[in-house]
Amino acid sequence: MAHRKLLAAGAALDLLAVLACLVLPLYSSDGTDGTGSATLLAVNGAGALVPLGLFLGLGLLAWAMPWRVARLVAVLLHGALTVLALLSIGLLFVPAGLALAVGGFRELTAPAAPPVPAPV
């Protein structure tokens, strides 16, 4: 069950990264009226919530799905999204992606649960 704890840690790190994207000033400017900074939401508007929701949703799916294959697909999609977003917010999601990847690898190498016998 160590892989489930890693998947939960990855989902928690996703939540932290989403909160960081909403709160931290990720943009700065040097204009004629001085320097300034702004958050992701202030610059991009409500549309910035879509990729953040995708990251968080995939992290939660990787942790909470009851089916092994669905969890692994969520881990792979999260990794692909992290690589695609590396030039912007993806760097904040790398720790979550690593925790999910290690948890997914451990799940692949863990033996499958034995079948539950039918009641007699």
Image: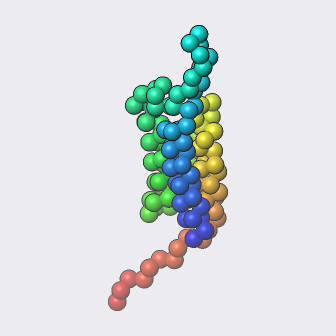
Foreground residue, 60 or 119? 60
- Most extreme residue toward the top, as rendered? 32
Quarter of the rendering occupied by the N terminus: bottom right
- Identified at 63% across, 63% down, the residue is 106
Q: Position of residue 21 (x, y in %)?
A: 53, 38
Q: Position of residue 14 (x, y in %)?
A: 53, 49
User: Is residue 115 among what the camera can see?
Assistant: yes
Q: Is residue 62 left or right of residue 110?
A: left
- Most extreme residue toward the front, as rendered? 33
- Identified at 38% across, 83% down, the residue is 118
Q: Position of residue 57 (x, y in %)?
A: 45, 48
- Identified at 53% across, 55% down, the residue is 12
Foreground residue, 91 or 76? 91
Q: Is residue 1 left or right of residue 70?
A: right
Q: Position of residue 17 (x, y in %)?
A: 55, 45
Number of numbered labels in the structure image: 0
- Chosen colour scheme: rainbow
In the picture, residue 99 is in which quadrant? Answer: bottom right
- Most extreme residue toward the bottom, as rendered? 120
Up-down relation of residue 89 to residue 116 (above or below): above
Foreground residue, 52 or 75? 52
- Identified at 35% across, 86% down, the residue is 119
User: Is residue 74 among what the camera can see?
Assistant: no
Q: Is residue 23 left or right of residue 29?
A: left
Q: Is residue 88 left or right of residue 62?
A: right
Up-down relation of residue 40 to residue 70 (above or below): above
Quarter of the rendering occupied by the C terminus: bottom left
